[in-house]
Image (cartoon, helix red, strand yellow):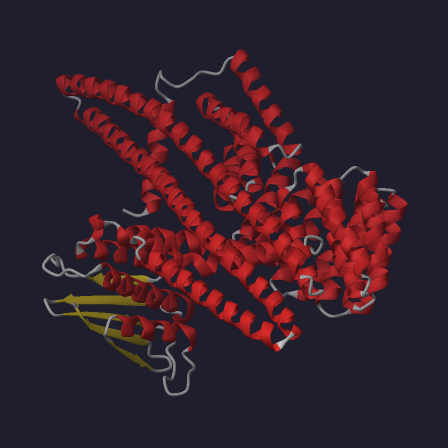
Amino acid sequence: MKLLNSTIYLGIAFFFLKNTPLAAQSSPNSLRTIQDYIQKADSLFNAEEFEQMRHYDLLSLNMAQQINQPEYLGKAYFLHAKYLSAVQKFTDANQFYQKALQAYYIKQNNETTALIYNDWGFSCGETGALDKQVEYYLQAIKIYEQLNHTVGLAQTMSNLSAAYFQLEQDEKAFTYAFKALQIREKSGAQRDLAISYTNLANMYAQTDSMPLAIKYIDLGLAAAEKSKDKQRLAQVYITKSLLLNREKKIQEALDLERKAISLYEEMKNYGIAANRYIAAAFYSNMLGDSANALQYFNKSIALASSLQNKVVMRNGYNYLSNFYLEHHNYKEAFEQYKKYILLRDSIVNSETNTRIAMLQAGFDLEKKDFEINRLQIQERIRQLEIEKQKAVIKGNKIEAERKQDEINLLFKTKELQEENLLRQQNELEKQKLLTANNQQKLIIAEKEKIIQQKQIKNQSLIRNLLLGLTALIILLALLGFNRYKLKKKIEQQASIITMRNNISENLHDDIGSSLSNISLLNQLAQNNAANQAKLGEYLEKAGEEIQYVNESISDIVWNINPRYDNIQNLLVRMRRYAADMLDGKNIDYQINFPEEANQVSLNMDRRRNFYLFYKEAINNLVKHANARNVTVQLQINSNHVELEIQDDGIGFDTQKHNTGNGMTTLQNRAAALNGQIRLLSQPGKGTRIDLLFPVT
């Protein structure tokens, strides 16, 4: 049964539950309590205290569902959506924005309704649903226009401008940017004007229109100065500094960074000030002023240390290590690198443990709710059984059938709740596996640190070898001996890693590069914090990488589980993957898999390569074929497996068309299976891919 039908069953079942005597009834005390929960959660949200907010958020959500009054349901759903967005769970947040509208706000059509559409649009953009992002921004604009709410209208138009710019629809992007600017010029709010001017400056800079970028950043600077808003003025200083850096006006860029630092320290916003000291250090180093660069690096680290801001401290030690390497001070470079490694490992452990603790708490809460709902369902089923028997005794067949339908729906609800609880448990297990992998990475990092220490010492030895021929021979012998020991250690390390179980190996192989990309994108995002467009781009890419890691972990956990050694389970997963991908694109499909295939067994590696070949083929088809109908045929005997995937899409000329990385990946997977691949396609006549490989 498809997910849509399951959702309908679940919704109907909850309807029956809410209309039973077990459902909580609203009272003045309960209404005051939920109001108090919502106010506390909203206050903590505005203060960015998200971990504390989560407690009141869940209380208000649970109580609102029990009371079942539209106004409080809408408020609780909106509050929960904001929390999920704040902790970057945008896919889940999208569902609760929709629930908030459906429960209450869509009928109100007020300022909050428009705000929900605006926030929902932003959340959709973070998940890559740019078409939905634009749609919801336009809906928010429509409501703001009806209400003549100029502040919200200008803000949403500014957001829509950024969305169109990301879609590379520059004309529309600039149109809405200037509309937002016109509204703000009429209102005369200098702080908001500074935002519009700065956004335009960033857009012109990214289209390489530097004269216009400088023009609008200067207007933004003037508006920020008139507003006397120190926060906005400091942000404009940073943006203009980045633009001046692009024009190689390093001294002017440094002067603006110093002004921004002064403002942040005046506002006692020392965390951002510590970050900006790093930028000032970079500019000073570019100007050849290594003394000032070193001074700024040390100020950044000292300030971050006083705040216990480990992230900024980690970055400061890393950049300082590179600074010393650039100036050939290898001893200090190594000392700073050791500090960087210690902080990096500490942050990774802290973040991972926090994530697991949050998942465990959520899972425990889910289990409690599940038990409550299970008891409610059982009680309701008993009631319905009694009512059904009474109807049967009275000869009321229609009433008896209706009661039986309600009983069936409640059983279906119970099954869906059990499946949801199982998914929660699987997510927790995946995170624990990821933690184990991180521990393995920390061990490897420690080895890398030893290797770097050896390399730095060797560089120092090489420099001293110039003192004489005798010293040269001795030191070369020591170097050779050290390298021999280092090689042995590396070989021992490789041997240990080879002996690791399949879980560690597969995690490392499949997600290692993606985790590195996420780390790099995170670093780039931090370095471009003032550039909203770049920041969004890097965060979006990081989100895609995280999604890929999540899917890879799911595939790895499934692949190594001995429960799935049976090929019949592989076919079930293949069928489910094709259904998810093809249903999402409204493609009709026919999957013909053998009913009985238990006589054939594939080992873990062959099963994995076969499944990844299948995923790549289906994924390429969905992305490029533009097909309406797809047929998947699989034949298995004791010696060979034959897979055929055929579509009625646009096809292509195999002699002329560059098949790209997708076909290369398929060929590599086929080679790993010792199999043969055949590609048949003509323009306008669809595409067919055949794979034939031996079972062993």
Q: Out of 317 and 438, give the one closest to the viewer.
A: 317
Q: Splitting the image into 4 quarters, where does residue 220 fall?
A: bottom right
Q: Residue at x 41, y 60 (%)?
A: 489
**Residue 671's quadrant in the figure?**
bottom left
Residue farthest to the bottom?
A: 655
Say which residue appears at 34% left-offset and 56% top-offset.
Answer: 496
- Number of numbered discs visible in the structure rendering: 0
Q: Position of residue 432 (x, y in %)?
A: 39, 42
Indicate the position of residue 571 as horizontal and vertical percent values. 22, 57
Q: Could you tell whether 481 is left or right of 627 in the image?
A: right
Residue drawn at point x = 37 percent, y = 59 percent: 492
Percent coordinates x, y for residue 560 in the rendering? 27, 52
Question: Front-most of 99 and 399?
Answer: 99
217 up-or-down from 230: above or below: below
> On the rendered image, what quadrant is the C terminus found in?
bottom left
- Residue 128 visible in the picture: no
Q: In the displayed orientation, state which residue is furthest to the front.
A: 470
Which quarter of the figure has residue 452? bottom right
Residue 110 vs residue 394: left or right? right
Give whichever of 525, 346 is nearer the camera. 346
Find residue 405 and report its horizontal and vertical position in percent: 24, 31
In-image side of 138 versus 677 (left or right): right
Residue 530 seen by the camera: yes
